[in-house]
């Protein structure tokens, strides 16, 4: 069994990402705007319909971890 743990987005020569915790919390990171902080976005089941894009950036890589 696998669990979603990260999503990487690319656009305008810049990467951003979302990190998904074990409990399903989704956190956004963009080093240019958030520095070394993550921004809480909500629970995976509530925001799963918006995960294909991060602003103008398109989803490029999906990371799973084996449980």
Image (cartoon, rainbow, N blue to C red):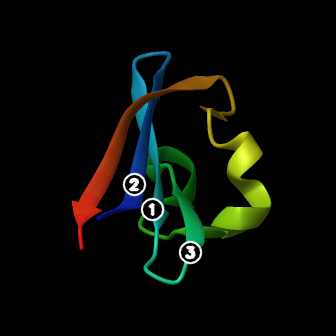
Cβ atoms under marks 3 and 2 closer than 8 Å: no
Residue at left offset 69%, top offset 32% = 55
How far apart, in angstroms, are the residues tagged by discs 3 and 2?
11 Å
Secondary structure of the residue carrying tag 3 is loop
How far apart, in angstroms, are the residues tagged by discs 1 and 2?
5 Å
Q: In the figure, is residue 52 to the left or right of 30?
A: right
How far apart, in angstroms, are the residues tagged by discs 1 and 3?
9 Å
Residue 49 drawn at (x, y percent): 75, 43
Q: Earlier in the sequence, mark 1 or mark 2?
A: 2
Closer to us: 34 or 27: 27
Residue identifier under label 2? 6
Closer to us: 33 or 4: 4
Q: In the rendered view, would you say 9 is above or below 63?
A: above
**Quarter of the rendering containing residue 3:** bottom left
Closer to us: 21 or 64: 64
Residue identifier under label 3? 24
Closer to us: 15 or 35: 15
Q: In the rendered view, would you say 23 is above or below 17?
A: below
Cβ atoms under marks 1 and 3 closer than 8 Å: no
Q: In the rendered view, would you say 54 is above or below 24?
A: above
Q: In the rendered view, would you say 30 is above or below 34?
A: above
Cβ atoms under marks 1 and 2 closer than 8 Å: yes
Secondary structure of the residue carrying tag 1 is strand
Residue 45 drawn at (x, y percent): 71, 65
Q: Which mark is residue 4?
A: none
Q: Residue furthest front?
A: 1
Residue 2 drawn at (x, y percent): 31, 61
């Amino acid at each position: 069994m696998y669990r979603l743990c990260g999503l990487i987005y690319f656009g305008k020569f810049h990467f951003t990402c979302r990190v998904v915790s074990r409990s399903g919390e989704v956190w956004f990171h963009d080093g240019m705007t958030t520095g070394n902080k993550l921004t809480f976005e909500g629970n995976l089941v509530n925001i799963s319909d918006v995960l294909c894009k991060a602003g103008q950036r398109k989803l490029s890589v999906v990371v799973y971890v084996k449980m």
